[in-house]
Image: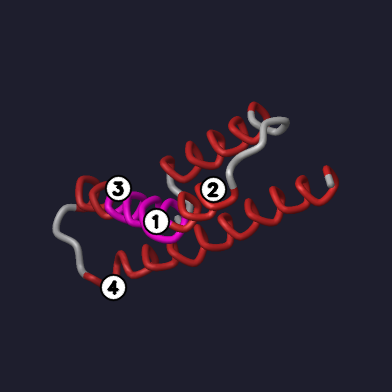
């Protein structure tokens, strides 16, 4: 399962934050830096750790190939981050 419970919660929070802050302007530099840190490294790493712990609790001793799919969390979060950036840039494009 590539998407875990943590991933669904993060996507739900992201949608909620998009709805709440849609009309507010965000500083572009702060938004870009936060987006790169969150979607580029922090969120996929946390999701990967949670998934490995979940597999370890349910199965017990794990083989590295059983959790190899967790490395796909990084490109998935990169795609989500790029999509989020495109949504924000489209919003700013309509405003100008």
Viewer-side label of 2, 3: 2
Give residue 60's position: percent from left, percent from top.
16, 53
* Residue occupied by mark 4: 65
Magenta-span inclusion, residue 39: yes
Quadrant in the rendering for residue 22: top right
* Residue occupied by mark 1: 44
Lower position in the chain sequence, tag 3 or tag 4: 3
Task: Tell me the residue at 55%/42% (across/down).
Answer: 11
Lower position in the chain sequence, tag 4 or tag 2: 2
Give residue 17's position: percent from left, percent from top.
59, 32
Lower position in the chain sequence, tag 2 or tag 3: 2
Q: Callout 2: helix, strand or loop?
A: helix
In the image, taking residue 60 as reference, residue 50 lies left or right, namely right
Task: Tell me the residue at 64%/36% (across/down).
Answer: 18
In the image, taking residue 43 as reference, residue 21 lies left or right, namely right
Instruction: Tell me the number on the disc at residue 8.
Output: none
Question: Mark 1 and mark 4 in contact (Cβ < 8 Å)?
Answer: no
Q: Callout 3: helix, strand or loop?
A: helix
Segment colored magenta: 37-51
Q: Nearer the viewer, residue 40 or 27?
A: 27
Lower position in the chain sequence, tag 1 or tag 2: 2
**C-alpha separation, residue under disc 3 versus residue under disc 1:** 10 Å
* Residue occupied by mark 3: 50
Instruction: Tell me the number on the disc at residue 31.
Output: 2
| Within-10-Å neighbours for mark 3: few <14, some 14–19, many 20+ | some
Give residue 50's position: percent from left, percent from top.
30, 47
Q: Farthest residue in the bottom direction? A: 65
């Amino acid at each position: 399962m590539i998407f875990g419970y943590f991933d669904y919660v993060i996507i739900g929070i992201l949608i909620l934050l998009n709805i709440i802050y849609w009309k507010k302007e965000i500083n572009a530099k702060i938004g870009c830096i936060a987006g790169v840190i969150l979607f580029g490294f922090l969120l996929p790493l946390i999701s990967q750790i949670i998934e490995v712990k979940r597999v370890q609790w349910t199965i017990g001793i794990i083989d590295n190939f059983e959790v190899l799919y967790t490395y796909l969390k990084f490109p998935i979060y990169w795609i989500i981050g790029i999509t989020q950036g495109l949504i924000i840039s489209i919003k700013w494009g309509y405003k100008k």
